[in-house]
């Protein structure tokens, strides 16, 4: 029989930290903290299995649940010395959601459950504080009404009825702050709140404590399937069938006076990674006040002065927790009349900067091993992106400040520099980016808000940066931005935001929706206008060489981590590059070779395109060869540059791949211009363009089909490669060319092309009187190539999966057109990921697996890599490791990410 309820309290708990699947993260950690002797208010966790049952059984509970809950409640009452629903000595509880992984703010919480007209009296007697009791009651009615009874507005245009009543009362009393309301005002509020409930729901507000609790439990389970939770899970790849647990915890109060407070903290700085106690608290407040970011809280260090013994105890707990969990913790605590209570602990969300610093520091402190430091749960590979992201150019920023553009300073909550257009609403931010297209400099947006809430998640995702007027470093805006790796400033109190007018004012300056604004997430500075950015410290050290390694701590820690990664990974990492500079940058980022050099890009530079066009327009072999002669020296020069940049590392060069029409001008005026330039009549050009037109050029005369029909093209390219290789080798640099034939589907295609390669090599080596080691291999980008990989391997000395084409040909989805529907597919759970970014493991991946196995059945030492865009995607890298590839190849800036993903794959059990 299943056990559905797990108790914790009085120093002993039935759960443990490793029971997250069943108890959710919050429940498992409350149990763990109880077991290690920390002060946790007693309570119990209703398991995620109950949530699953609830959805599988028409929103009902297992029959045994009621009795288990009643039993756990009795034990909670005994631990806390109070009774749930008792008018004299009432116990109040909260009901809080908690899934296996944290989904900040996505699901519901209800506090102060158990309050009614009679327990209220008991609370007043117990605390001797009538105002506090009434304030708790009005908060409860409001929260319960919003969350459980469904009075919360569903869109930004609706108004929360409770907020409205509150505003009306404050207005009529002539007060601004909630704290200025008297006890009588609070009583009046409760009366009006209850009236609103009756009007809207037709029912009285529930009085019975158990009815209240079961209502809250239903709301928590119900919130697992609310829209924003679904969107969040989709974004982070969390399965919908995990379910949430519901935690019933005894209430403790941070709003019982000036000897009470509530706060949140991180055991180290989650933005920079520095080893300092980092957090904030509010005196005389409840937790919701901190997270909602309505009042700007005090820094944790000030607690040392406000409540010295509490600070000392909390700082000790900070150390205990870090040692116990061996990771940075994000904690919630409350002090009730001088006594400290721990309400939550979990691994803290962190920026990429902090993730790297925590990991490296903790190895050096002896807290964790290198292997652990490298794990994906500590450093998701994409986080390294943040270390490579731009900063403001200090000179440009200095000038902007001198010109009076500095508007204000807030709390630096997410590092990096961002410039964008002001948008005040999440929907507007999303629409703007969608309209202009991500990557377009004009599409950049800074979401500027008083505070953010979970509804804003998509807009935050769309924005380059987030700026809020309220809230601290643990507010929703800060937490979520950090997780997304967005630049973020919060608590910028000088901003006066008027949503209705669409303006933000600072002193006498007014900026409007659509104006440019710049935010520095390292310093918290907000500037009007655009400010130029400059490369990150890592890029300055490695690429620009404008900073020395010992001048940058960020670089040193990055380099240390990468060194550990390289020691333990099996998969090699190469780069896709077709220019010497790109190749050199990639080597600086750790590339171990070139996995794909697309030669066609070389034909577009300078005057080369004219020779290329002449070749395409030629009507016979002789004329074609003459034009190719002109291209030869260009290609040879390019390859020499690349071989030199790669200093002996392997270089995979692909022969011409795109359909020829891509090189010809299609507009009439451009055709006339070309005619004048190369002396071919304009009607001949137009006719040739017509001839080359294809209904589906991706499946037309391209890839090796070009080299088969026009062998002289392959011949020229090979001559350029081998002449360059001989020249560079003669000059003292080792070379290792690998000639790769694209889009092969039939063994005879590869044989015909390979013969050309070998013949030209022999000829060039004889003429140059040297030989250079080289390989001939093929791209695997067609399903047929995977199916007959054993045949193809008779000729191919290596395979490289061209997963861009392999995905489009396997799925029958055009890589240029799938964008029009793929978002819809992902939002409707037809596919969980974009198959052109992360490999479709079952389909395309299945073919890859077959290709590797069949290829190696013919040639056991067959070298296999991947050079499609997927090669820089961490999950694909892990898949490639699993199926036994030798290397992945990706764009230069993805190389560090692939190195980390590769070691994680190697260390994964
Ligand atoms: C591929 O198809 O995956 C590939 C790398 O080639 P291209 O993108 O140039 O078609
Ligand atoms: Mg391709």
Image (cartoon, rainbow, N blue to C red):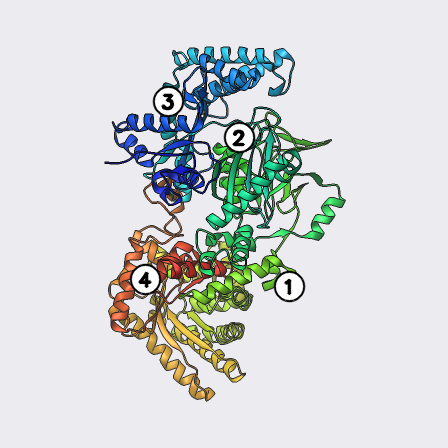
Neighbor class of circle 2 (other Cα within 10 Å; few <14, some 14-19, many 20+) is: many
- Name the spot of residue 521 as percent of width and height, x first: 61, 45
Determine which residue is flagged by label 3.
Answer: 215
Determine which residue is flagged by label 4.
Answer: 883
Residue 550 - label: 1
Mark in front: 1 vs 2: 2
Q: Earlier in the sequence, mark 4 or mark 2?
A: 2
- Name the spot of residue 175 as percent of width and height, x first: 64, 16
Mark in front: 3 vs 1: 3
Nearer the observer, 173 or 400: 173
Nearer the observer, 46 or 749: 46
* Contact, mark 3 vs mark 4 (Cβ under 8 Å): no
Image quarter of the N terminus: top left
Q: Which of marks 1 and 4 is nearer the N terminus?
A: 1
Whole-Å distance between the Cαs marked 3 and 4?
A: 50 Å
Residue located at (59% from left, 60% from top): 555
Residue located at (53% from left, 30% from top): 287
Whole-Å distance between the Cαs marked 1 and 4?
A: 40 Å
Neighbor class of circle 3 (other Cα within 10 Å; few <14, some 14-19, many 20+) is: some
Q: Earlier in the sequence, mark 3 or mark 1?
A: 3
* Contact, mark 1 vs mark 2 (Cβ under 8 Å): no
Determine the secondary structure under disc 2: helix
Where does ligand 1 appear, by image quarter? bottom left
Determine which residue is flagged by label 2.
Answer: 287
Instruction: Give the quadrant of residue 295.
Output: top right
Neighbor class of circle 4 (other Cα within 10 Å; few <14, some 14-19, many 20+) is: some
* Contact, mark 3 vs mark 1 (Cβ under 8 Å): no
Horizontal side of 215 relative to 534 (left or right) equals left
Residue 486 appears anywhere in the view: no
Horizontal side of 201 relative to 633 (left or right) equals left
């Amino acid at each position: 029989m299943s056990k559905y309820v797990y108790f914790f309290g009085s120093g002993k708990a039935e759960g443990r930290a490793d029971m997250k699947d069943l108890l959710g993260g919050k429940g498992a950690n409350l149990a763990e903290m109880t077991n290690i002797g920390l002060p946790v208010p007693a309570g119990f966790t209703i398991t995620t299995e109950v949530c699953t049952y609830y959805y599988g059984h028409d929103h009902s509970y297992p029959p045994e649940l009621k009795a288990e809950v009643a039993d756990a409640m009795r034990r909670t009452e005994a631990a806390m010395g109070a009774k749930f629903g008792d008018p004299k000595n009432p116990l109040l509880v909260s009901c809080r959601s908690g899934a296996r992984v944290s989904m900040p703010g996505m699901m519901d919480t209800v506090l102060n459950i158990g309050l009614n007209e009679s327990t209220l009296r008991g609370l007043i007697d117990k605390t001797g504080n009538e105002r506090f009791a009434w304030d708790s009651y009005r908060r409860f009615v409001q929260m319960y009404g919003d969350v459980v009874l469904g009075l919360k507005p569903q869109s930004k245009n609706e108004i929360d009825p409770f907020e409205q009543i509150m505003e009306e009362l404050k207005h009529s009393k002539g007060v601004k702050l909630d704290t200025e309301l008297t006890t009588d005002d609070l009583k009046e509020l409760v009366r009006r709140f209850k009236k609103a409930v009756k009007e809207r729901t037709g029912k009285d507000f529930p009085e019975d404590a158990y009815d209240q609790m079961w209502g809250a439990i239903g709301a928590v389970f119900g919130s697992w399937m609310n829209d924003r939770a679904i969107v969040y899970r989709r974004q982070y790849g969390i399965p919908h069938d995990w379910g949430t647990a519901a935690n019933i915890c005894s209430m403790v109060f941070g709003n019982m006076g000036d000897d009470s407070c509530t706060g949140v903290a991180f055991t180290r700085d989650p933005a920079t990674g520095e080893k300092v106690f980092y957090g904030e608290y509010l005196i005389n407040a409840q937790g919701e006040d901190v997270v909602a970011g309505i009042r700007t809280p005090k820094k944790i260090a000030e607690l040392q002065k406000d409540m010295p013994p509490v600070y000392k105890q909390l700082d000790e707990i900070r150390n205990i927790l870090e040692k116990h969990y061996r990771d940075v913790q994000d904690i919630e605590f409350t002090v009730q009349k001088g006594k400290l209570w721990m309400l939550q602990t979990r691994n803290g969300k962190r920026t990429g900067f902090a993730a790297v610093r925590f990991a490296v520091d903790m190895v050096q402190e002896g807290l964790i091993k290198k292997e652990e430091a490298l794990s994906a749960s500590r450093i998701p590979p994409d986080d390294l992106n943040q270390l490579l992201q731009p900063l403001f150019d200090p000179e440009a920023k200095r000038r902007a400040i001198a010109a009076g553009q500095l508007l204000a300073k807030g709390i630096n909550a997410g590092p990096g520099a961002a410039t964008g257009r002001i948008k005040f609403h999440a929907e507007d931010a999303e629409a703007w980016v969608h309209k202009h297209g991500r990557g377009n400099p004009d599409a950049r947006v800074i979401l500027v808000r008083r505070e953010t809430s979970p509804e804003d998640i998509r807009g935050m995702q769309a924005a380059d940066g987030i700026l809020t007027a309220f809230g601290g470093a643990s507010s929703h805006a800060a937490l979520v931005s950090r997780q997304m790796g967005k630049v973020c400033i919060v608590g910028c109190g000088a901003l006066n935001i008027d949503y209705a007018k669409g303006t933000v004012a600072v002193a006498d300056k007014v900026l409007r929706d659509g104006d440019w604004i710049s935010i520095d997430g390292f310093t918290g500075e907000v500037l009007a206008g655009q400010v130029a950015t400059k490369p990150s410290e890592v890029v300055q050290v490695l690429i620009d060489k404008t900073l020395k390694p010992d001048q940058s701590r960020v670089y040193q820690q990055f380099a240390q981590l990468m060194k550990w990664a390289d020691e333990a990974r099996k998969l090699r990492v190469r780069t896709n590059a077709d220019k010497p500079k790109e190749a050199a940058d990639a080597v600086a980022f750790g590339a171990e070779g070139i996995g794909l050099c697309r030669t066609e890009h070389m034909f577009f530079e300078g005057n080369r395109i004219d020779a290329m066009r002449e070749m395409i327009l030629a009507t016979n072999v002789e004329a074609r060869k003459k034009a190719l002669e002109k291209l030869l020296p260009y290609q040879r020069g390019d390859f020499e540059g690349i071989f030199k940049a790669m200093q002996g590392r392997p270089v995979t060069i692909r022969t011409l791949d795109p359909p020829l029409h891509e090189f010809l001008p299609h507009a009439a005026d451009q055709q006339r211009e070309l005619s004048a330039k190369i002396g071919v009549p304009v009607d001949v050009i137009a006719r040739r363009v017509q001839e080359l037109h294809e209904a589906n050029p991706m499946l037309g005369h391209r890839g090796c089909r070009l080299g088969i029909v026009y062998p002289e093209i392959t011949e020229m390219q090979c001559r350029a490669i081998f002449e360059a290789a001989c020249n560079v080798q003669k000059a003292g640099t080792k070379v290792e060319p690998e000639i790769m034939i694209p889009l092969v589907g039939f063994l005879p295609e590869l044989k015909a092309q390979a013969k050309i390669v070998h013949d030209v090599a022999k000829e060039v080596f004889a003429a140059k009187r040297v030989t250079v080691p080289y390989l001939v291999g093929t791209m695997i980008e067609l399903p047929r190539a995977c199916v007959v990989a054993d045949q193809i391997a008779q000729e191919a000395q290596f395979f490289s999966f061209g997963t861009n084409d392999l995905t489009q040909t396997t799925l029958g989805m055009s890589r240029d057109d799938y964008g029009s529907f793929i978002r819809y597919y992902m939002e409707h759970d037809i596919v969980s990921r974009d198959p052109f970014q992360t490999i479709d493991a079952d389909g395309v991946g299945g073919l890859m697996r077959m290709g590797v196995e069949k290829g190696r059945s013919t040639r056991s030492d067959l070298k296999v890599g991947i050079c499609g865009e997927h090669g820089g995607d961490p999950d694909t890298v892990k898949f490639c490791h699993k199926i036994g590839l030798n290397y992945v190849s990706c764009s230069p800036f993805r190389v560090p990410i692939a190195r980390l993903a590769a070691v994680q794959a190697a260390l994964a059990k």
